[in-house]
Amino acid sequence: MELTLFLDHQCNLRCTYCYNGEKFTRAMSLDTARKAVEVALAVGPTQHLDVSFFGGEPMLRMDLVRDIVAYCEQRVETLRPKPSLRFIMNTNGTLMTDEAIELMSKPRNFSVFVSLDGDKEVHDRYRVNAAGKGSFDDVIAGVERLRAAGISYQLVGVVSTGTASALGRTVRALAPLGGGKVVLAANFRDEWTEASIEELRQGLRDAGDVWMEMFRAGKKLAVEPLHTKILTHLKGGIPCPSRCMLAGSEMCVSPSGKIYPCAQMVGEDTNDSLVVGHVDTGMDMDRIRELQVQKDRVETTCEPCALRDRCQSHCGCRHVALTGKLGVITAALCEIESSFIEAADRVAEQLYQEKCEAFVEYYYKKSWVAARGGTLTQLRRSRDD
């Protein structure tokens, strides 16, 4: 089970594309967080418990994070069988204090997702503080502190219509900074046009060229979602974890105590049509089933598509981002997903033909295992049988 705690709507940055709406202070109470943990544990027996901190900027509330971590560690010790426990910090990376580094360091199992949209010029164009100053230098300092402390981290670059053409620069800037992988996350709330989609395709070609350079030099680094798209070809469908099942193996709790299927749906915590429970009453299973039916309407829409089993059209938060409704998508999703698949296949075909040693070892001589709580491949067609 992955429990995401949306700790506060406040943030120290004012990124121009932020989907969480207005920044205001509404911090989660420790009591609400404890109740959220109990709801997550009550869903059913679990071998793994992932507790993810989200916002706003969750590192504004490190005192609360510390208390929640302590509660989770104490609570897990009482369970038999004892589940593994991992913490995940989703952060803009600008607040890496000594206290934060100490809390997230080993032997505690922490993974950190740091938002970094590219090189200084690209990043500072969109990710600014309240005074309008770019945050690139502060993020780099934070990443260096994570690296020095040996804390696991990944870099996440948001891909908007304004940055799509610069993806080669983005991968080139992020790859040397370490971390488990580089993630290119499309902003589905942006206004994607034919022109911007074409810029995305060219940007992905450039990113693919940079990625190929890395493999040819012997460097093995996953660049998402190109990495996953290659695995969809090798494995015949979306690989680990399993496909989006609303609130099936994850849930997000807002400061008010409302439960959402995922963090991407909280926003300003005003859309009760996406709420699937409350920490005081638990999960509303009837509501979850109702929303799942709504979400699965997209399966009919996507039935004829040849890319059906390599596309993430199943993802409910993407539906909401694109249209405000579950089970409804637009051509933008199809174009963006096909752009990623096209770029991934170009890289894979080229490097396979070259018999690039690092590429072949990474994709053909490595045993890809399922992510925690997921199956290696769960095809939609297998659910239809």
Image (cartoon, rainbow, N blue to C red):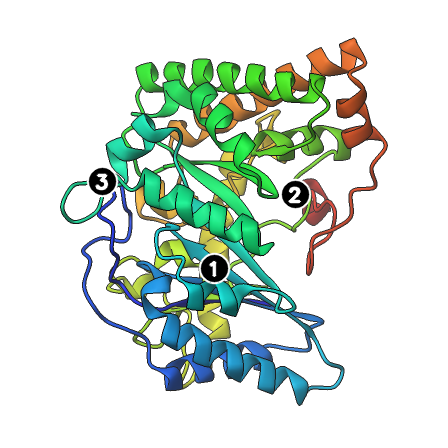
Q: Marks 1 and 2, how far apart in space?
A: 31 Å
* Left or right placement of residue 120 versus residue 53 in this view: left
Residue 270 is at least partly visible in this image: yes
* Left or right placement of residue 47 versus residue 224 in this view: right
Mark identifier at residue 380: 2
Based on the displayed image, in which of its 4 quarters is residue 185 positioned? Answer: top left
Residues 238 and 289: in front is 238
Type of amino acid at the residue the image marks with label 2: Arg
Q: Which residue is mark 3?
A: 16
Mark nearer the N terminus (1 vs 3)? 3
Based on the displayed image, in which of its 4 quarters is residue 190 positioned? Answer: top left
Mark nearer the N terminus (2 vs 3)? 3
* Left or right placement of residue 376 versus residue 6 in this view: right
Q: Residues within 10 Å of mark 1 (few under 14, many from 20)?
A: many
Type of amino acid at the residue the image marks with label 1: Met
Q: Marks 2 and 3, how far apart in space?
A: 36 Å
